[in-house]
Structures are given as structure tokens and as C-alpha cells.
Image: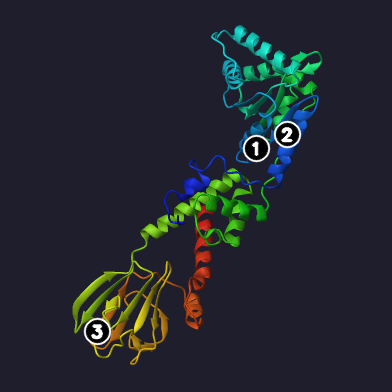
Amino acid sequence: MHAHDPSLGSKAFGSHADSGLIVAYQSHQDALRFLSSALSQVNGVALLQGPTGSGKTTIVTEQRGWSSRDAAVALIDGTRLTPRQLLNGMLSQFDVRTASQDDEQLLQTLNRFLTEQTRKAKAPVLMVDNADRATSSTLRLLNWLAALDVRGNYALRIVLTGKEQLSALVRQKSMRNLARRHPAAYSLNPLTPQETMIYLRTRLIAAGGERSEKVFPIDVCEKLRELSRGWPGALNERAMQVLDRMIELRSARSVPRVIVTRDGEVVVERELTEKQYIIGRTSLADIVIEDAYVSKVHAMLQIYANAVVLLDLNSTNGTTVNSTVVQKTVLRNNDIISLGRYRIKIENVPAISAEMDEKITESDTMTMQNLTDMRRSRARRIVTALKHK
């Protein structure tokens, strides 16, 4: 799969990304160690703080997998969460069946389950993601649940995630039972420049992308980190925008084509969709020129994403472009290649800078590496455009 695949951005950084793909970084790993340690303590309450897109959901989802090996775990999104939704969500994820929807009955059923599990030294774990977005009545229920104990042991271990003010929320009077358990708090840190590069390239490769170092060179990674401030969620959005923009540019670019004429009459018109074309008198050539002036294997057209290059293949009579004999040159739009009585006009070729032209002309062998600087420059322009949107 190539970087111009329209679905690549979504598969690498969007809604179709593999939910099991986790690119760990230092703060991510530190947060997991923090949660494991906090849940093993007597008070058993942990607060995970960070801005939107900082990776909180990814981290608690991973922690849920680890914690579920030893106890029942419920992970519930707190956004506009009501008390009944919380109770039903906990019972469902704890695999406790109940036919009643009466709040009192739901609480009694939940209390019995928590008591039974705590007596087995397997106090269940409740994780409320985005707890600071829950309704006030739900927060009061959380406060009530935090006070449940069995023979001096808390009956529920709790993990709450939210923005930086989550600690202040827990210190409110309405949350005093939770505050009495002296919850430990950890604030997430953004990705470093090195972690950003690894993150972007790893996700692209995992989605089936190729040449990740070309799509996300170091300078582009640095710019994306600057725009996202190093937070994974914003980084995903910016990366998708870059990939989408690259696809737009590719789609908008016309396919190079040649028009071959003999004595002024069109012989053939052809789009250049392959990587290279041999021009020559032999029938094995891609573009056959039946003229005694032309060598059997006379010249070659090399087609790149950002340039069309003409190489003379040590022909007997040489190759002329716009009345100038050339050995190697980057073709411009409407350039005319003269071969005996034939003329080859090139159309729809990408524009290229004079600096890039010089680099290509000076090189001994034309390879894709010759265009690295131009690709990076183009990627920087895309990122800059996104910044000013």
C-alpha cells in the first residue's frame, strides 16, 4: 500500500486504525506503571490527567486488559453519564445479570457483588474515562461507591481520567469520600521529538504504508509536533491532514504525456504512466522512432512524481532538446525533443526548481534519491499551509 492510498490516513491515524496498535512512549509507560501501582495500594484510587487527545483513553483501555486478569473491571465513558447508565454499565461489564431497572435494586445487586468479590481479595475495578464530563448526580454516586468497604477493605478500586482540573474536582465537598482515600494523581506529558517520529512512522507502516521516512522525514515530524504540541490525538489529526493533502495534490496533478510528430503530422500521442520509456529505432523500444538518424536504443525518459528526466543513451547522433544537444536534462512543459525528422513534445510535466535541476544535472546516476529534498520541501509547504488554515 502506498502513501497515495485514499484510505491510508484513516487506517493509520483515524477511525479505521487498528485499536490494538499501541505505540508506547515514555509518559504512556510511566502512566501504566502509575496505574498498576495505585490500584495495588490500600486506598486504590488513581487519577489520570491530561488535555483532550493526550492518550488517556488508550492508556486506561490497555490497563483494563492487565487488571482484568485478576479482577472484574468496568471501563465506562463519563461523558454526560447518568447514575443509571453507570450502574447498568458496571453490572453489565462485571457480568452480573439483573432483571430490575429500579435504582435501589440495581444498587443492592451491585453492592452484593462488590462485597462477595472483596471477601475473595478481588475487589473490582471501576474506570471512568472523562469523569469530569459526568453529570453531578453521577459524581455523587461515585462518591457513595468510594465509601463502600468490607471489613475495613475498600470494595471498589477506582480510576478516573479527565483534564488537568480533575484533582480539584475530587477535592470538592461533594466528593469527600473519594478525597478521604487520598487518590494518587499522574499528569501525562507530550511526546518528545524522537517519540513523535517513531509514533508517526510506526502507525503508517502498521497501516500498510511504505517509505515512512519519505512521508514523514525528520523536519516534517518536528513541524507536526510543534502544531500538535506533542499530544497523540492532535498529532493523529495533523498527520491525516498531511496524507489527505498529498492525495489531493497527486489527484490534481496531470499525467505527463508526449506527442510524437513526423514532418509536422501527429504520429502518436501517449500518456506517461510507467516509470521509464526507451526511445529508439528498434521495435523493442517503448516509443519507436523509425528514422535512420535515431539509434536502436537512443534515449530514455524517466518518470518521477516530481520530474520527467531525459537521458541520452550514448546515441550516435545525440539528443536535442529545444535546439540544444543534451546528455541529461529535466524536461519542462512543452519542451521539444528533436530526433531526425521526428519531434517529441512533452506536456503536463511537473514544475521543478532551478536548484533541483542543478542537483539532477550534476549527479552521475539519476535515482529517486535525487528528489528527496524536493519531496521534503513539498511536505513542509503542506504542513505550513495547514498551520495557517
**Rendering quarter of residue 269:** bottom left
Q: CA distance from mark 3 to mark 1?
A: 66 Å
Instruction: Work out whether 379 lies above or below 60.
Output: below
What kind of residue is marked 2?
A: Leu
Separation of marks 2 and 3 at Cα, in angstroms: 75 Å
Q: Going from the N terminus, do you reach mark 2 or mark 1 first?
A: 2
Callouts 2 and 3 close, C-beta under 8 Å? no
Q: Secondary structure at mark 1?
A: helix
Counting from the top left corner in percent of width and height, residue 192 is at 68, 52
- Which residue lies at the image location 51% right of the left edge and 53% below the top edge? 386
Residue under the image location 43 percent in, 68 percent down: 306
Nearer to me, 355 or 15: 15
Amino acid type at mark 3: Tyr
Q: Position of residue 36 (x, y in %)?
A: 74, 34
Q: Is residue 176 left or right of residue 247?
A: right
Read off the residue under disc 1: 59
**Residue 42 visible in this rendered orientation of the protein:** yes
Q: Which mark is residue 35?
A: 2
Mark 3 lies on a secondary structure that is strand
Circle on res. 342: 3
Count neighbours of disc 3 (C-alpha within 10 A) and say few if under 14, some if 14 to 19, many if 20 or more.
Answer: many
Residue at the (77%, 28%) spot, across then down: 183
Q: What whole-number distance in Å separates the C-alpha atoms at marks 2 and 1? A: 9 Å
Image marks 2 and 1: residues in contact by CB distance under 8 Å: yes
